[in-house]
Image (cartoon, grey):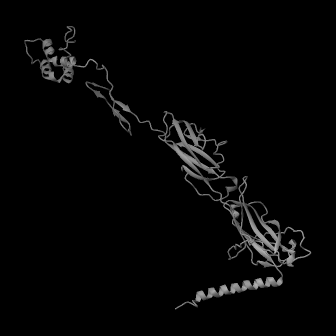
Amino acid sequence: AAQEDPQIDVVGPWADEVAALLRYDCSDAAAEIAAIVSGNSDASLSDRERLTLATEPLNDRLAAWPDEAESAAVFRARLDRLVEPVSYQIYLGDAWTDSARVEIIPAPALELQLTATPPAYAKAAPTTARDSGSRQVSALEGSRIDVAANCTNNKRLQRVWLTLKDETEPLRLELKPVDDEQQQWRLDVSGTPLERIERPLRFELQVTDEDGLHLPSPARAYIGIKTDRPPTGSAEIVHRVVLPTARPTIIYRVADDYGVANVRLKMQIEKARESDGYRAEDSDAEPTTASASPADSNVESSSAATSAEATAPSEATTSTESSHVDLLAGGPLVAEQLPRRGEAPIDLGSLGLVKGDRLKLTLEVTDYRGESPGVTILADPLILEISDESGVLAAISEADERSEERMTEIIKQQLGIGDSP
């Protein structure tokens, strides 16, 4: 169209530019175009006629262009992963763009901090240091879990929220900023399951920064429950056959990981039947609670805590009477005071016992768990046989004989006596 318009001089000042465009769009006419521009073409033809001949291949190409083809097209390019800023320039056909630059906008980077505060009764117990950035912690039941999130690449955060994964419906909790830059956020756990955990919990944390970007994947955390183990206790006594008026001493030991709330000695009297001749006028005597005076000094003993099996009442007994003695005074024992060893003398004379009776002693230990009820355990029971002087002496003699036999056996083993050659 331009070459047919006499007002447009496509050969004069615009010849070089027209030639460049035609060389790109119609390479078949490249030689003719070059001759026209240089003035080496047929001199009998005018410049316009020579240009018309040179562009005939281009006209043929345009005429063959499909009618249904769109007048515009969209071209796309893609970089799978941009890790640093880049500068670019686009060339399409004979067109090009100015140089442009793509800057990197980083996604927010987050440090999640979980802090477990144990219940008041367990704060005195020694704890193990843990990395504040850990996303998996174990806490004692009843602990408080504080959640904090810090942006580590200095981006201003617009929102930070936590989604608690519960057995029922997910619970969404919003964190609040604690600095003007909105890079440090904290969760108010009051009234939430994190104020006092009672079961294992899982949650996810997500953010929105000033550029509207989120974490590539949510920050996930797990809070496990650390078991408060039940207490332990044991009791031992030197002589198992005693007089009705004796004052035997019970040696006991109690321990727990956080504290002991109560220690007491349960006493169960199994009275002899009147038909066996052990008692006559005293068979209807009322039981009296025994008194105990726990000693504060520790008991140094090399013998292990004995565990006497509780034998079932024999046919010589017909009734039982129960009572107990508190061995712990002055409030609960905390972790620094455990394990605790003590002695408890029992005044049998106040119980109205006679020959043939049996006294079952069981140590009962309850641990301390603050406002929550403690766990109670029973140690292996001790059985005391009530007898007269002859019975006590016989029991002592029998024990001495067993000790002597055991000692002799140990000496033989040490000397190698009796070993086959």
How far across and how far down the image is residue 294, in percent?
A: 79, 69
Q: Quadrant of the N terminus?
A: top left
Q: Residue at x 46, y 38 (%)?
A: 107
Q: Is residue 72 above or below residue 190?
A: above
Depicted 34 relative to depicted 392: above or below: above
Task: Give the side of residue 403 with respect to residue 98, left or right.
Answer: right
In the image, 251 versus 312, the foreground residue is 312
Q: How many marks?
A: 0
Q: Position of residue 352 (x, y in %)?
A: 87, 73
Q: Residue at x 76, y 83 (%)?
A: 396
In this image, 176 relative to 372: left or right? left
Horizontal arrangement in the rendering, residue 104 relative to residue 385 (left or right): left
Q: Residue furthest right?
A: 281
The reply to whether residue 340 is in sight is: no
- Can you give x and y, in whole percent of width and height, for residue 199 in the image? 62, 49
Q: Nearer the viewer, residue 9 or 189?
A: 189
The quadrant holding residue 385 is bottom right
Name the quadrant containing residue 392.
bottom right
In the rendered view, does 364 fall on the left or right side of 38? Answer: right
Q: Between residues 358 and 290, which one lies in front from this camera angle?
A: 358
* Picture quadrant where residue 317 is located: bottom right
Q: x, y percentage for residue 367?
A: 71, 60
Picture layout, residue 247 above or below residue 203: below
Depth check, front residue: 5 or 345: 345
Confirm whether residue 204 shows in the render.
Answer: yes
